[in-house]
Image: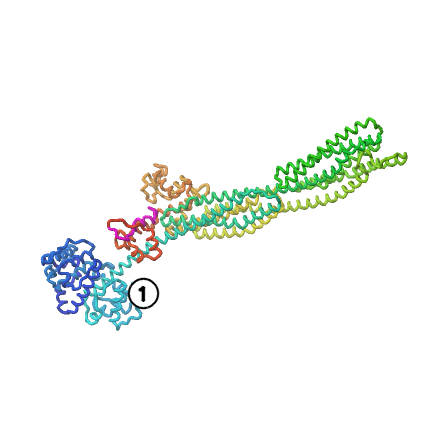
Amino acid sequence: MDHHYDGQHNDYMQPEEDWDRDLLLDPAWEKQQRKTFTAWCNSHLRKAGTQIENIDEDFRDGLKLMLLLEVISGERLPKPERGKMRVHKISNVNKALDFIASKGVKLVSIGAEEIVDGNAKMTLGMIWTIILRFAIQDISVEETSAKEGLLLWCQRKTAPYKNVNIQNFHISWKDGLGFCALIHRHRPELIDYGKLRKDDPLTNLNTAFDVAERFLDIPKMLDAEDIVGTARPDEKAIMTYVSSFYHAFSGAQKAETAANRICKVLAVNQENEQLMEDYEKLASDLLEWIRRTIPWLENRAPENTMQAMQQKLEDFRDYRRQHKPPKVQEKCQLEINFNTLQTKLRLSNRPAFMPSEGKMVSDINKAWGGLEHAEKGYEEWMLNEIRRLERLDHLAEKFRQKASIHEAWTEGKENMLQKKDYETASLSEIKALLKKHEAFESDLAAHQDRVEQIAAIAQELNELNYYDSPSVNARCQRICDQWDNLGALTQKRREALERTEKLLETIDQLYLEYAKRAAPFNNWMEGAMEDLQDTFIVHTIEEIQGLTSAHEQFKATLPEADKERQAILGIHNEVSKIAQTYHVNMSGTNPYTAISPQEINNKWDHVRQLVPRRDQALMEEHARQQQNERLRKQFAAQANVIGPWIQTKMQEIGRIAIEMHGTLEDQINHLRQYEKSIVNYKPKIDQLESDHQQIQEALIFDNKHTNYTMEHIRVGWEQLLTTIARTINEVENQILTRDAKGISQEQMNEFRNSFNHFDREHSGTLGPEEFKACLISLGYDIGNDPQKKTGMMDSDDFRACLISMGYNMGEAEFTRIMSIVDPNRLGVVTFQAFIDFMSRETADTDTADQVMASFKVLAGDKNYITADELRRELPPDQAEYCIARMAPYIGHDAVPGALDYMSFSTALYGESDL
C-alpha cells in the first residue's frame, strides 16, 4: 500500500520533487540528515530503552518504527507481528504508516515495501514527515505555526544579540552563534557568550552542541565540520535540531511557572505554620507564668512582724512595677498576633487557626482574670494584715503597760494582808487597821477595772492570733490568780478586824478623813499617769483633734486637783499639829492608809512632768496627720484629673474607631500619633504611682477627697493602651485585606459608612438583623436560593425584595453568611469580619485545583510525582516540605516512590488533613 503526503494543513511540506532534487544535488545533505534524524530518533527511543544504529536498516522490520511512534505520540499502536518473514515486516511498517496517516498526514510515494527494502531516500522522507508532524507542526508563535513559527521564535529569542541574524534554517546558523545565543538566552550560566568570536564557527558550534548535550539533554545531531564545510547546510537537519531547543526551553518555562506557583503557595503555608508555632509558644509561656504567679498571690501565710509584712508589700510592688507590665504587653501582642494570623489565613483562603486546647485567646483572658482576681485579693489581704499587726503591736504594748502597773501595785499586798499586826494593837490601832482595810478594799475595787481590761486585751490578742500569745496568756493567768488570792486574803483580814473591832472603838477621825480623801485622789493621780502614758493610734485629723481637746480639758482640771491635794496635805498637817500639841503617842504613820504626803507629792510632780510630754506627743501626731492629709489631697488632685482623662480618651478612641475618615494609611498615622500622645502621658501615671506609694508607706487607708483608687487608674490605663493597640491592629488588618483583595479606598469608605450607619449604638459591632440590613443597603441580594448571589441589585429589584420578603434574606443563605462572619457564634459581626466577607465575594485567589494543575505540569501529566521530580523543580526546603507531607500514591499506574500530589493540594486549603 502506497502513501503520500500533501495535506492542506501541511503546506509547509517540501514537494517530493524538491526532496529528490536536494538528495541528487548535494549528497552532503543526505549525510547530515542521516546523522540528525538518527540522533533525533534515538533521543525518543532511549525512553523505551533502545536505539538505532543505521536508519536504513533498523526500521526495516517496522518494530522500532512502531515503538518510536508510540513514544512520541503517547498512544498505543496495534500489536506488531513478531515473525521474520517479509510479509510480517511489511505488515508492521503499514501499521506505522497507517498511524501517521491517522494524524492527518498524507504520505506521498512512500510505501511499506521501500522501507522494508531499506530505501534510504524513502526512509529519510518518512522520518522527516514524522518530525514535521510531531516536533514542528504544533509550534505556534504569534499566530504563526510550524516552520514559520519556529523561525519567528528563534528570531525573538536571538534579537538582543547584535551579531546574530536568523533569517532561515541553513546559512544563518553556520557561524554557531545562533545556537549559542539560544542557550545563553535561556541558561546564561552555561555559556560565556562574551568570549565567543564570529570568525571561529567550529568552536562556537562545538560549544553549543556539547553544552546542549550535557546540560539540556539534547543529543548531538550535527557535526560542526559538516556545517562549516557545506556551503548551504541541510535545512531539514537544522530545523530538526533547533526544534529540540524549542521543546526543551518551552517545557522548562512551563515547569518554572508551575514551580513558582507552588513556591508561592508553600511559602504562605510555611509562614502561617511559623506564626502558629510562635502563637502556641507565647501562649504557653504566658499561661505558665500565670500558673506560677497565682499560687504566690493566693498564699495567705501570715507574718508575725510589721517588718516582714512590709517586705511582702514591697515584693508585691516590685511585681506590679517590674514583672507584670511586660506580661501585659505580651498578652496584648498575643491577641494582635492571633488577629493578624487569622487575617492572613483568610486572605490566603486557608481555614481559620484553632489553637491547642486551653490556649485560645478566651482561655488566656480567663486565666488573666484569675490572676487579677488573686492579685486584688492579695493586696487587700496584705493591707488587712498590716492593720491587724499594727493593732496587735498596739494591744501588746498596752497589755504590757497595764500589767506592769498592776504588778507594781500588787507587789507586797499579799504579805500586807497576811500580817497579824492587829493582834497586839490598841483599840485605836484596831479601828485604824479596820479603816485602813476599808480603804484598801476601796482601792482593790478601783483596780478591778484594770484587771478586767488586762484580761480583755489578752483575749483580743488571742482572737487576733498574736504570735506571742502563750507568754501573754501566762502573764494574764498569773495576774488573775493573784487577784483571786488578794480577794480571798482581803475577805479573811476583814473578818479578823471585825472580830477585834468590838474591843477597839476609839478612832482618829482626822486620820480617817485623810485616808478617805487621799485614796481616791491617789487613784485619780494613778489613773491620770496611766492615761498620760497611754499610747494612742489615730488615722485622721479629727481623731487627733479629739484627743487634743480631751487633753486640754484634763489640763483645765489641774488647778482644782491642786486644791484637793493642798486640802489632803492640810489634813495630814493638822494631825501632826494635834499630836504635837497634845503629845499623842503616834506610831509615825497613819493607821488608816499607806498613802503618805510624800507619795502624793511625788505622784503629783510626776503628773506635772507627764503633761508637757503628752503635749509634745499630740503635737507630733497632729503634724503627722497634717502630712497625711496633704498626701491624700496631693494624690486626689492628680487622680481626679487622670481618671476623667483616661475615660475621655477611651471614649475618643471609640469614636475614632467608628468615625474614621480619609485613607486607611491616614487613619493609622492618626491613630499612631494618638497612641504617642497617650504614651507621653505615662510620666503622670508614674508620678501618681509614686504618690500612692508614699500613701501606703504612711499607712493611709482611706481618702475622702477622691473616688479613684490607684487600682482604678491602673486598670483604666492598661485598658486604654490595649484599646488603642487593638484599634491600630484592626486598621492594619484592613490594609492587609484591602491590598490582598484589591479593594479601592472608595469601596472601603462605602463599607465603613454603611457599617457605621447600622451600628446605631456605636459599639463597633452589628447584630444579625443590623448586618442583614447593611448587606441589603450595599445591594447584596440574598434570596431563598443560597446559590444565587448577583452581587448588586438595581432599585426595582431592591424594592421588590423588601416588599415581598422583608429584606429578601433566605434563612439558609443568611445562616451560611453568619457562619463565615461570626464563626464563634457570638451573635455580633465586627467591622473586620464585615470587610473580609465583602472582599471575599469578588476576590480571586489561588485554589486547590490550580495548585493541583501546577503539580501535574511538574509531573509530566502523570497522576503522581516522584521525590526526584520535586527536588529538581522546587527549591530544596519546599521540595522536602512536600515530600514529608505527601502520601504514597496508590493508583493502578503507581510506581515505587510515587507520591500523591492531588490529596496534598486539597489539604493545603483545609479540605482534608495535611
Circle 1 Cα neighbour tier, 10 Å, few/some/many (<14 / 14–19 / ≥20): few
Image: magenta residue range = 893-914
- Residue type at mark 1 is Glu
Please provide percent x and percent y for residue 504. 83, 28
On the picture, is 536 further left or further right than 99?
right
Residue, disc 1: 189
Residue positioned most to the top: 502
Please provide percent x and percent y for residue 245. 25, 62
Front position in the image: 577 or 64? 577
Q: Can residue 638 be seen from the camera position used here?
A: no
On the picture, is 869 further left or further right than 232?
right
Please provide percent x and percent y for residue 233. 19, 68
Q: Can residue 359 be seen from the camera position used here?
A: yes
Please provide percent x and percent y for residue 502. 82, 26
Colouring chosen for the image of the structure: rainbow
On the picture, is 453 further left or further right than 185?
right
**Location of residue 478 (image quadrant):** top right
Q: Total label count?
A: 1
Up-down relation of residue 366 to residue 42 (above or below): above
User: Would you say residue 895 sits in the magenta stretch?
Assistant: yes
Dot 1 lies on which element?
Answer: helix
